[in-house]
Amino acid sequence: MVEVRLTDAFLISSVIATMVFVMTSMMAFFYFGMDEKQIEPALRVGAVLGISTGLIVLFFAISRVRNHTEKGQLRDEKREAEVASLRKVLNYLTTDSDGAWISDERVRRERGVLTLDLHGLNAAQASRTIEKLIGIRSQLKRVRIITGRGERLHDKSADPGIRPAVIQRLKIDAPRVDWQLLIKSGSITLRPMGKAPTKIQWFTRFVVFIAPMCIVMGFSFRDLAGSSYSDQGLIFGITSGFLLTALLASHRDRSG
C-alpha cells in the first residue's frame, strides 16, 4: 500500500479544487448566456465552489492521513511487541541448543509476518517451542514457522523429525486457540481464524442484507434466463441470494 503524506493531501485537494473551479466556471458562463460581461460572475461562482470543495476534500484528506499515521504507529508497536514476547519466551533455547539457536536471529519479521525459524533445534525442542507458542497465543496474530522440508537431502541443517512433530502438535492445538494451519513446503503458517459472530450479530447481518441481496440476485438471474425460463431464473436467484446472505452473515472478524 502506498503511503499517503500530508503534502499529498494538499496536492489532491488543490487538483480537485482546480477541476471544480474550471468546470463550474464554464457551466456558469454558459448558464448566464456567454456574454463577456458574465465572465467575471462566472469565475466568481467557480472560485467559490472550487475553494469550498478543495477545503472539504483537504479536511477529509488530512483526517485520513492522521488516522493512517496513528494506525501505522500502533501497528508497528504491536508488531514489535509480538517479536519481543516470542523472543522472551524462547530465550531459554539458546542455552538448550548450545548456541545453535539464538532467539534474536530465529524470531524475526519477514515481509511483515512474524517468523519463527526452527533450524538448529531437534524434534523434542521444536515440539516444546510449539507448546510455548500456543501458550502466548493471545499476544500473537499470524505466525510463519519455518520447519524445513523434513529431509536431509534438501536441508542438512534441519532435523528431519521436526516437521512431522510440529505438524502433529499443531493439528491438535492450533484449532483450539483459533489458528488455521496453512501447510506449505518447508513452512507452516498459522492464520487467525477470527471470532465467529454471535447469534445476534448473525441475525442482524442477515436481516440487513437479505432483501437487497435476494432482489438483485433474483432479477439478475431472471434476466439471464430469458423469457422462456424467467420464473426458474427468479427462483434460482432468490435461493442463491438467501445462501450468499447466510454466508456473509457468518463472516469471521480476523482483526484480533
Image (cartoon, rainbow, N blue to C red):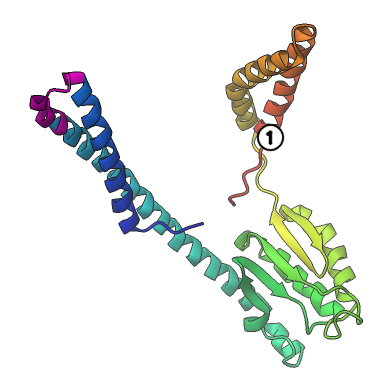
Left or right position of 110 against 71: right
Q: Position of residue 190 (x, y in %)?
A: 73, 60
205 relative to 61, above or below: above
Quarter-of-image position of residue 200: top right
Q: Is residue 147 magenta?
A: no
User: In percent of the image, x 72 and y 90: which residue is there?
Assistant: 95
Q: Which residues are magenta?
A: 31-43
Instruction: Identify the residue under disc 1.
Output: 250
Q: Is residue 7 above or below residue 57?
A: below
Left or right of 161? Residue 6 is left
Q: Nearer the viewer, residue 106 or 19?
A: 19
Q: How many marks?
A: 1
Position above or below: 235 against 143: above
Q: Position of residue 230 (x, y in %)?
A: 75, 9
In the rendered image of this protein, does residue 25 appear above or below residue 109? above
Q: Tell me where residue 154 appears, x and y as whole percent.
A: 88, 79
**Residue at coordinates 71% horizontally, 32% vertically from top-left?**
247
Q: Is residue 35 magenta?
A: yes
Q: Residues within 10 Å of mark 1 (few under 14, many from 20)?
A: some
Q: Nearer the viewer, residue 170 or 41?
A: 41
Expressed as whole percent of the image width and height from the top left, the position of residue 3 reads: 44, 59
Who's the residue at 70% across and 87% down the image? 94
Q: Which residue type carries mark 1?
A: Ser
